[in-house]
Amino acid sequence: MKEMIRNNICINAHPKGCGLYVQKAVSAVKKKDRFLGPKNVLVIGCSTGYGLATRIAAHLGSGAKTLGVAYEKAPTGKRTGSAGWYADLYYREAVEPQATTLNMDAFSHECKQAAIDEIKKTMGTVDLVIYSLASGVRIDPDSGVRYTSALKPIGSPYTSQGVDILGNLTQIHVEPATDEEIEHTIKVMGGEDWELWIRALLEAGVLSPQALTLAYSYIGPEVTKDLYRNGTIGRAKEDLESRAKAIETSMTNLSGKAFVSVNKAVVTRASSVIPSVPLYLSLLYRVMKSKNTHEECVGQMDRLLREKLYSGSDIPVDEHNRIRMDDWEMSPDVQEIVAEKWKTIGDLPLSEIGDIDGVYTEFLHMHGFGYPSIDYSLDVDLQAVR
């Protein structure tokens, strides 16, 4: 089986390779000492990226029981399942066999009720709720209206350099969003559903005293600012941050807390298709690896739990009450070098100024490909990850 890549999207996945991807993250956490952290964790968006990494770090780092929510495609006929389907399968088979994952639409009322029922059955209450959804579509559970997000600038077009996942330089031009596209993006990627989740959990009485809830976000550098933070997604992230305040107020009787965690740029299925981001990632990876500050998803989520949330001290936040896990990425010394490298794109080979090979390798591994120990010419059982 060979990887099939279209427009920076890998449309297939290798089962055993996805198992190796999870295994690597598991090994990274197992090398560290245990810490006193959460006991019962709900991860909404648990199958890949930061959601999966948090689940691994919480279970292996502090012995937490976890419940996951994901919406992944199972294999059918000769078509492989999604990478997240295999990663979650491996996690439940090899890492936390007693754990449950609800493969359902997290935006629906039915999914929220199923999660509540499972919490009551196996945990009683949860003390940490992670909201890590990455979906481009949301169906409003009350109105039935279908909303589709758009990755667009606001006010004026965005033109920039870019690169495809194979390392070919491209030119990017994106027209500005309409008012409807802005509204739709906020409905899909903003904080409304996060707030609905916490409301449902509160009403059901399944949140522990002093429970924490976090939603994951990203800000990014100057070079992507006009498309990302100042664009449609930025509006959605602003909504997410404003909802955190309302969510925390709703948790007052439990002395609960709600935060947005601004995470570092990494290769994920979502980030790979954002114009300019793979190019930025290649430059960033080169700089951060040279400074020995590069983190993949699981390293960063382990640091989030171990050093920010459960260190025994007050949770450190910025002036907007956000936890800044992008602190190493956005440090001035890193961003100054990245900005200088950005100016030389087109004059020097990307392999000299960036780490496009590292970005491509992470992209392949995330889908189960690129592992020397696997013979990809052999037939594979699409149902088995080991």
Image (cartoon, rainbow, N blue to C red):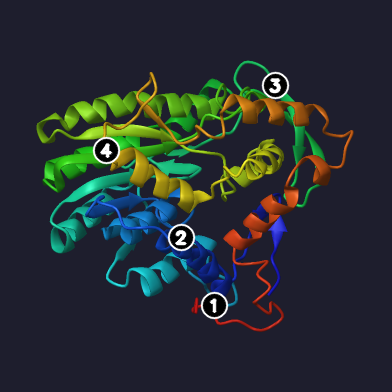
Left or right: where does residue 121 sit relative to residue 107?
A: left
First in sequence: mark 2 or mark 1? Answer: 2
First in sequence: mark 1 or mark 3? Answer: 3
Circle 4 crowding by C-alpha within 10 Å: few under 14, some 14–19, many from 20:
some
Instruction: Verify CB contact (< 8 Å) between mark 4 and mark 3.
Output: no
**Separation of marks 2 and 1 at Cα, in angstroms:** 14 Å
The residue that label 2 is drawn on is 72
User: Which quadrant holds residue 246?
Assistant: top left
Q: Position of residue 216 (x, y in %)?
A: 42, 39
User: Which quadrant holds residue 1?
Assistant: bottom right
**Separation of marks 4 and 3 at Cα, in angstroms:** 34 Å
Left or right: where does residue 82 sit relative to residue 246?
A: right
Circle 2 crowding by C-alpha within 10 Å: few under 14, some 14–19, many from 20:
some
Give SS at disc 3. loop
Front residue of this view, candidates 39 and 382:
39
The residue that label 3 is drawn on is 157
Q: Position of residue 110 (x, y in %)?
A: 26, 53
Mark 1 belongs to which amino acid?
Leu
**Separation of marks 1 and 3 at Cα, in angstroms:** 43 Å
**Separation of marks 2 and 3 at Cα, in angstroms:** 34 Å
Q: Where is residue 234 in the image (x, y as percent from the top left)?
A: 51, 26
Residue 381, visible in the rendered structure: yes
First in sequence: mark 4 or mark 2? Answer: 2
Give SS at disc 1. loop
